[in-house]
Amino acid sequence: MKDPDFGKGGPARDLFGEIDRLRRERRAVILAHYYQDADIQDVADYVGDSLGLSQAAAATDAEVIVFAGVHFMAETAKLLCPDKTVLLPDLDAGCSLADGCPPDAFAAFLERYPGHKVVSYINCSAATKAQSDVICTSSNAVKIVASFPPDQPLVFAPDRFLGDWVSRQLGRDLVLWPGSCEVHETFSERRLVELKVTYPDAVVAAHPECPPAVLQHADHIGSTTSILDFARRSPARRIIVVTEPGILHRMRQENPDKELIPVPGADESCSCNECPYMKKNTLEKLYLCLRDGTPEISLDPALAARAREPIARMLELSR
Ligand code: 13P
Ligand code: SF4
């Protein structure tokens, strides 16, 4: 760490002020996901879901993008903005979905399905994206899958629960890569049902990365942005929220009069409904990364060229 004062009992810093000064000096934009800590969301220029963040990255004229999210999100921003510097406060901010779909194993899997087109959830590496025909997010997955003719066989990767939900929405078979989100798969159906019994007037909003046993109890299923829209629009005074609790920061701001009830993971002794990867980023690391211009996302240009195409196709289909 270059700053001897930092983190060693030195003078307290006005991190918000410093981040703001550096952002202007570096001509940087800070993009943050809804699962980030509240202070990171508060300092960000834009907070959104994966689709909104990709669109914001593609549209920015800033020279530097600081991505307060996980690796695949920052990598997507770099794919869309190859000439910009893209920084991620902690390079270890991974994702169980991306890590659970190694590109070589995915290539071998695809060989078993000749004639299939490949729809990949954005939560995957550039090397997996490069093997895909089109990318989707949780906000456009149904629309992207439906854009293929009904007789076109499809592989959907890497989230089997999102793929299963899309398949049921469209009444269409999909070949599913067996991946899952280690956070959303831990939500407990038992705890959710108990909460519904305790609060019979509450409505349930869930992310489609949850298993079907959980989703069957939801009044609304959608991306983080769509869950926030639902919470604002719903006349219900109580909302049971089945996604990462970072979303509650924005939801509380937008719904000061509603009671928001997070669902715990199956093991109540841990905070396993929190994404450990998202939480690797901190305000301090955000400050350091703006100050030092590192850690930076870099990509092999040939791989990037192949991975960019299916993302561009998604953005085109999402207009
Ligand atoms: P959203 O695109 O809905 O924000 O989801 C991203 C994610 O990683 C959910 O776990
Ligand atoms: Fe990945 Fe799940 Fe974390 Fe989202 S919540 S970034 S899908 S591990």
Image (cartoon, rainbow, N blue to C red):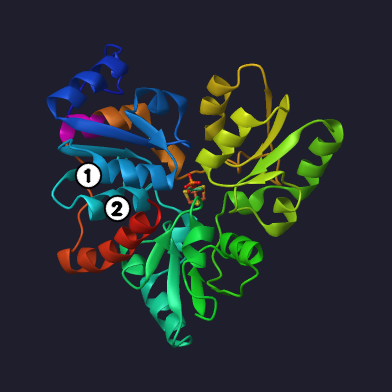
Please identify the dominant SS of the magenta region: helix
Residue 78: image location, x then y, percent? 24, 51
| Relative depth, front residue between 257 and 299 | 257
User: Could you give the CA–CA distance between mark 2 and mark 1, rounded to whole angstroms?
Assistant: 8 Å
Q: Residue at x 41, y 39 (%)?
A: 280
Rendered image quadrant of residue 3 = top left
Q: Residue at x 33, y 59 (%)?
A: 311
Query: Would you say 158 lies left or right of 72 here?
Result: right
Bin the neighbour count of mark 2 within 10 Å (Cα to Cα): few under 14, some 14-19, many 20 and up.
Answer: many
Label 2 close to label 1 by CB (< 8 Å): yes
Q: Residue at x 65, y 50 (%)?
A: 186
Question: Is residue 72 placed above or below 258 in the rendered structure?
Answer: below
Residue 301: image location, x then y, percent? 16, 64
Residue type beneath disc 2: Glu
Residue that label 2 marks: 75
* Pointer 2 or 1: first along the chain: 2
Residue 14: image location, x then y, percent? 29, 13
Residue that label 1 marks: 86
| Relative depth, front residue between 272 and 240 | 240
Mark 1 residue element: strand
Mark 2 residue element: helix
Question: Is residue 8 placed above or below 155 in the rendered structure?
Answer: above
